[in-house]
Structures are given as C-alpha cells and as structure tokens.
Amino acid sequence: MSILKNSIDGAIVALEALRSCEAEFQAAVVAMADTVTAGGKILACGNGGSAADASHFMTELLCRFCEERRSLPGLALTNDGSFLTATGNDYGFEQVFARQIEGLGKPGDVLIAISTSGNSPNVLNAIEAAKAGGMRTIALLGRDGGDTAGVAEIDIIVRHEVTARIQEAQKVLIHALCEGIERRLGLVA
C-alpha cells in the first residue's frame, strides 16, 4: 500500500469534514475582520505543530498572504522562548498563554486557540483568560473538540482522528481564514 496515497486520501477526508463548518468559518472571518476594523488585534496560541500553525497564521496577517496589502495586527503567543520558560517555571506550563493574554489582550481583541486534540490545559486556560478579559474567542480543534469544545465563542472542528491529517486541514483552514479576512476588509480584489 502506498504511504503517499494513504496520506492524500486521509487529507481529503479531513478536508471534506471542514465543509460542514461553513457557518463557523464565516463567523470567524467576521469576528477577526471586525476586530481589525475596530483597531483591535488577533492573538494566536497552540502547542507543538499547533504552535507552528499559530505563528504561521500571524505571519500571514502581519506580512501578507497572497497580495500586497497593509500589515494586519496579529501576535503569536508561542514565539517568546524566554517568556514561555520563565512562566512555565514560575506558574506552570498551563499558564503560559493565559499570562500573555492578561498582559497583552484588550477587550474586543480576538484569540485564535489551536489544538488538534482539544485537550491542552494551557489552550483551555487561554480561552478562559481571553473571555474574562472581554476578548472574542475562536478555537480551531480536531477530533471531537475534546475538553475545549463549546468553551470558545466559535469552534471550527476538523472531525478526524489522525493528528497529521487534522493539522493539514487546519493549514488549509488558516489560509482560507486569511483570504476571508483580506476580502472582508477590502484589501484584495
């Protein structure tokens, strides 16, 4: 059996699962575009591959996605190794994102919380801290959403069991969100 064929087939199944998330996708685009229009920012967090996806997403906003346009305000809460290790040491790894949200988040900002399992305590705590701070919350989750399902204002769940396939679908989702934000803001044709 071909590993490549199996990977492609699995990715297609994961991507097809996103088709049922159109309403949540549109709500997420509106929330993020409206936040930017109001002068707010988008913060993102996740662990491991989801940390890389959070950083990738914010890079697409700050730099550009497909076409030249102004920079959009985004911040990955995964990029400061000194902060992450100090907070992990002093407060516990469960607080590494919540502490940043307390200091950097403002009412009306948006948190994008990414977790393939939905069971990451630090991601769940980040959502709770964002809600307590008057921020909007969007969770990009996998499997059945885990413990995080239903905690954020908007959940977009890739209903698949394989982490790699969930991550692949979330990458497509992140690119679609970037395009949706740019179009809603009228920054691209």
Image (cartoon, rainbow, N blue to C red):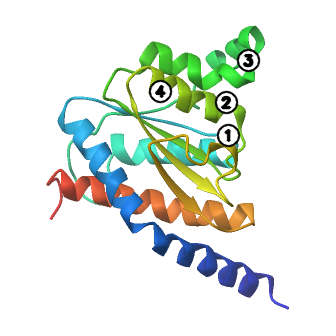
Gap between marks 3 and 4, in whole Å?
19 Å
Reading the image, the residue beneath label 3 is: 88
Whichever of callouts 3 and 4 sits on the residue coming sooner in the sequence is 3
Evaluate whether residue 99 shows in this view: yes
Which mark is nearer the camera, 1 or 2?
Answer: 2
- Secondary structure under tag 2 reads helix
| Camera-side residue of 59 and 102 | 102
User: Which residue is painted at 18% across and 50% down in the image?
Assistant: 185
Please state which amino acid type lies under the numbered disc 2.
Asn
| Camera-side residue of 10 and 144 | 144
Gap between marks 2 and 3, in whole Å?
10 Å
| Camera-side residue of 166 and 83 | 166
Gap between marks 1 and 4, in whole Å?
17 Å
Which mark is nearer the camera, 3 or 4?
Answer: 4
Do the residues bearing badges 1 and 4 touch, measured as CB atoms within 8 Å?
no
Evaluate whether residue 65 shows in this view: no
Reading the image, the residue beneath label 1 is: 47
Please state which amino acid type lies under the numbered disc 1.
Asn
